[in-house]
Image: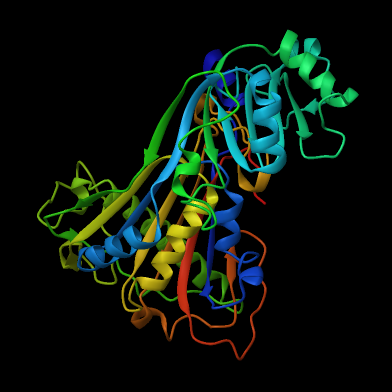
Amino acid sequence: MTQLMNKLAHEGPEAKCYITCGSLREQPAAEVSNRRPHSTISGHVYNQQVDLLLPDEVCELVQQKLDEHVKPLQYHRIFMSLKDIVEKDFYNKYIRQGNILLLSDGRIDVDNVYCLYDGFLYLFLKKDTYEKAGLAGKKAAFGGRKKERWVVEYNLRQPHMLHGRPAFDRLVWSFTNVLKEQKAWLFCDLNQGALNTLSTASDAATVSGLTVPTTLRTATPSIMRVNHAIKLATFNHSIPQKTTSEYDRAVFYDWAYTFHEWLALASINADRVHSTQFIDPLLSRYGVPTDTPGEQEAAVGKLAKITWRGFIPAAYVSKIFGVLREHVPADQWFSMTVHGFQNAPISWKGRQHSVVGGGMGGENLYTILKLAAAVTDDQLDETADVVMEGTEGDLGSKEAPPSSKYIMWEVVGGRDEHS
C-alpha cells in the first residue's frame, strides 16, 4: 500500500491533445507562416519520422509529384565532442555563416544532452556537471528524476561570440576541460539542395572542418500499399464554430479523438480496421467511428502509406506538406503525422521538453488531416479557425477565396508547455 501511495503521489500529469479546425487559405508566404498548421510545422524543430496516409487511388500521383519536387534528404551521424563544434573552420562555415541542426544522444532526464538550431546552442546538464562547467545558466523547467537539471543557452551568432573574445574563450575552456565527453550526434545542413534551391545536393555530402569520421545517411520515402480493404471512419462530422453550444463541441471532441485513434490504427495496418476482421466483443469493443450504427456498416477502401525516417528538419516537412496541398485532388483527403524525438531537449517552438521517465513525457507529435472538399464545403466557415483547448485563431476576411479544410491534433507531454 505504501508503494502504491508513493507512486500516485509522484505521478505526473497526463499528455494533452490540442485540436485545431480551420481552412488552408491561399495567402502570401509571410502571412501563411504565422498561421496554423504552418506555424506548427515550422515550430516543431526535431523530427524523426513522417507518416503520410492517403487513399490508394492517389498514391501514384503523389509519389510522382514527391519525386519531382522533394529531393532525398542527407544527414550525418558523427561521434564528436562539444569542442569539435567550436573549431574555427566548422564554426565559421556551419554556424556563423551557414545554418545547421544538431542533436546529441542521451536521455534528457539522466544524461547531459546538447542540441543546436538557428545558431542557438542548448546544454542540458546534470547539477554536478553544471557546477564544474562554470557557465551561466538557469534551472531547467523539468528537473529530471532528482529535479537537479540545469540549462545553458548561448546564441553563437552574436557579434562577441568569436575566437579570442573572453565570452567565447570561456565556452571553449569549458568544452576542453569539463564537457569533453564524446557523444554521437545527428547533423543536418539546412543549406543543402533538398531544402534550399540555391544549393546543390552535393553540398551536404561531406562535413568540412571536422577531423572525426562521419557516416552519411539519406532519408528516402518508403511506400506501403495495403492490398486488403480497410474500414473507413466517417469524414462528414459537423465541425463546431465559435457560436456552437458546449454540448455540440463535446460531441465533436469525442468524434475527433476516436477519428485520431482510427488514423493511428490505419497507419500501422491494425487488424481491428481490416474489413474482413471481426472479433468477439468480449475481447475488444473497438469500433470504427461511423454515422451508422454497427461496425459492419462502415464504408471500406484501400489506403497507402508513405514514410520518411531520419533526422528531418521542419523545412523538409514543410516542403512535403506543400506538395501535398498543391497536388492532392480537392475531392481527396490525406493525413500527415510527424513524430518528434523523445529525448530532444527542446520541442514546440523552442520550449523545453519534459523527461520521458515513467511514461509521463516524451509526447511531441502532430497530425494534420486535409479533408475532402466535397465533404466539408457546407460544414466549416471559410472565415475562421477554431482552436479547441487553446486560444482561438485569428478571423479571416469575409472575402477570402474558397480553400481546403483541415483538422490538426497536437499531442503534448503532460509537463510540456505548448506555444
Q: Is residue 81 left or right of residue 138?
A: left
Query: Going 65% across and 65% down the picture, which residue do you hit?
Result: 34
State the image coordinates of residue 370 (x, y, percent, origin top left). 41, 68
Q: Is residue 391 above or below residue 99?
A: below
Q: In front: 160, or 129? A: 160
Q: Is residue 19 left or right of residue 323?
A: right
Q: Is residue 64 above or below residue 176?
A: below
Q: How many marks?
A: 0
| Residue 130 visible (yes or no) | no
Q: Is residue 146 left or right of residue 103?
A: right
Q: Tell me where residue 48 sits by quadrant.
A: top left
Q: Tell me where residue 170 sits by quadrant.
A: top right
State the image coordinates of residue 355 (x, y, percent, origin top left). 59, 28
Q: Is residue 401 above or below residue 288?
A: below
Q: Is residue 22 above or below residue 284?
A: below
Query: Going 13% across and 58% down the picture, which residue do you hit?
Result: 275
In this view, the residue farthest toward the right is 166
State the image coordinates of residue 227 (x, y, percent, origin top left). 11, 55
Q: In front: 14, or 9? A: 14
Q: How is the image coloured?
A: rainbow
State the image coordinates of residue 300 (x, y, percent, origin top left). 17, 65
| Residue 154 visible (yes or no) | yes
